[in-house]
Structures are given as structure tokens and as C-alpha cells.
Amino acid sequence: MIRFESTVYTHFIAQKETPCTIDFLSASLLRFECRTSLNQTFLNNYLMIYNVGGGLNLAIGGETVELGAGDLVIVSPFTTYSGIAAPEHSAKDNGTSFYLVEFSCSNFSFFPLEKYAVFEGANAVESPLAELFSKYVRSEAESYICDVLLLETIYIAERLAKETTPQQQLAVKVRDHVLQNLMKPLTAESLAAEFGYNKDYLGRVFKTEFGRTLKDYINVQKLALAKKLLITSDMPVAAVGQFLGWADLNQFLKYFKYHEGVTPAQYRKRESN
């Protein structure tokens, strides 16, 4: 089971204010070489079906859904589904194969999901699903690893569910740039110059997509990394500040205490006890 809040999910999509718990339950990979009916099943949990290849016709809550190779569907709990695996629909004579992943979620707010949601051309989910299935059947990983792989798959589906506008693409590029350059001095002004946009415009675009200002986002990410280094390494406080882009130790000390209420040394001592 994995529980995350907006500050964690920021690394994926950031706009989530409500804590959420995801719990991976099971994974299967089914293969059929001939036309096969799938019995009607009532779902108590969420179900993810990814069609690797071949034809797959489903009836979900009384509605017909056809999945081609590379298509994904996520079905909500308290829904019935049945289906027909139809290998003859495949361009290659390799039968029909698809992943089934069952999971629970305390608050599914990633994208609208009433009975189900279909994502065409979701080939990007095949890699994390294959790894998830492999680790599950071989019991190679702790349960949280499977939860993380599941979350990665849901994140891909969310990106597919959103209409990606140029503004959204820009916001994602800025976010990725911040995460990749936390060891450098970063400001809203420097980012605007880096990307060639007006500072106010870039700030509005970023806040619309990620729910916080550029300054707040930079502060959260830098402080999170600073605290991690203070706890998990023996780097001197001055070295931590330099690593995160402060040439002046006093500026780093003031910055850290302003946001955390204690100095870096006090924070390290408190957390090590």
C-alpha cells in the first residue's frame, strides 16, 4: 500500500490536494489462441485491462468496448464486465493476450472515471505493467514496489486522458527543468529567461497546471532535497548549501530557518535522534 499527498505526487502531476492510498492487489497475463468467452464478473475493486495483442471485445456495465492492440481500459468497482477474446482480429496470428491488474484506491481523482475509461494507443503502459506482473508472479519485490509501478501506469493513463495544450507542455518542461537543476540557483526570473517567456505569463501557466507558484515549487523541491541530504549523508551544512546553489552559507542558513523554523544543523540533530 502506498499513501501520498500533493507534495509527493508533484513529481508526477501535482494538483492533488487530497491524500490518496493505492493498494496493488494482483496481476495476470492471459493468452488465448482461439476465440474464448470471458465469464461475467462483478468487480469489488478497480480493474485495469491492457490489450497486448489480438482482439478483445468487452461488455462493461451493459456497454460494449472494443480494445485493439495497445489499448487500455480502467474499470471502476461495483461494475460487471464480460468479454470475448477474438484472436482473428489480430494482424498477426499470435492469438490474444492481455494484462489484468486489480487494485484498490481510496480516492480516484486522477481523471473522470464513472464505469470505465478507455485509452487508445497506450503502449507506454506495457513496460511498467510487464515489470509489475513479473515482480508479482516471482515475488521479487516488496509490495510498495508494485504499488509504485501501478502508480506509474496510472500516471501514464492520466497524461493520455488530458488534452495536452502548448501551455501544459511548457509547464511540464519547466517542472522537469527545475527537478533536473536543483543544484543551481533557480528563480522565476531565471526560468523566464531560460525559456524565453515573460515572467508573469510563465508563472500563470505553471500555476494553472501545477497548482502553485514557481517560487513555491522551487522552495519545496530545494528544501526537500536539502533535508534529505542532511538526514542521509554526512555532508557539512555548508556543502549542502553549495550543492543546492548557494555560494553564501549565511543566505542558505537564513533561507532554511525561514522555511523550516530551525537551522540545518538543528534539523539534522533533531531528525537523527
Image (spheres, helix red, strand yellow):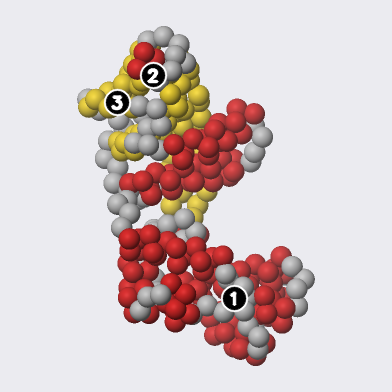
Q: Are marks 1 and 2 in contact (CB under 8 Å)?
A: no
In this view, the residue farthest toward the top is 34
Q: Residue at x 36, y 46 (%)?
A: 160
From the top left corner, tell me how far across and down residue 252 is, in percent. 62, 84
- The label shown at residue 184 is 1
Q: Residue at x 37, y 10 (%)?
A: 35
Given residues 144 and 157, the one toward you in this image is 157
* First in residue order: circle 2 vs circle 3: 3
> Can you give x and y, in whole percent of width and height, for residue 50 in the image?
42, 31
Residue 38 shows in the view: no
Q: Which residue is mark 2?
A: 90
Horizontal side of 225 relative to 96 (left or right) equals: right
The residue identified by callout 3 is: 66
User: What is the spatial separation of the Cα atoms under label 1 and label 2, in whole angstroms?
Assistant: 51 Å
The answer to whether residue 115 shows anywhere in this view is yes
Q: Tell me the amino acid under the disc marked 2.
A: Ser
Is 52 above or below relative to 131? above
Furthest-left residue in this view:
62
The amino acid sitting under disc 1 is: Lys
Instruction: Count neighbours of disc 2 (C-alpha within 10 A) and say few if under 14, some if 14 to 19, many if 20 or more.
Output: some
Report, in whole angstroms, how far the alpha carbon at label 2 lies from the one at label 3: 13 Å
What is the secondary structure assignment of the residue under circle 1?
loop
Q: Is residue 141 left or right of residue 50?
A: right
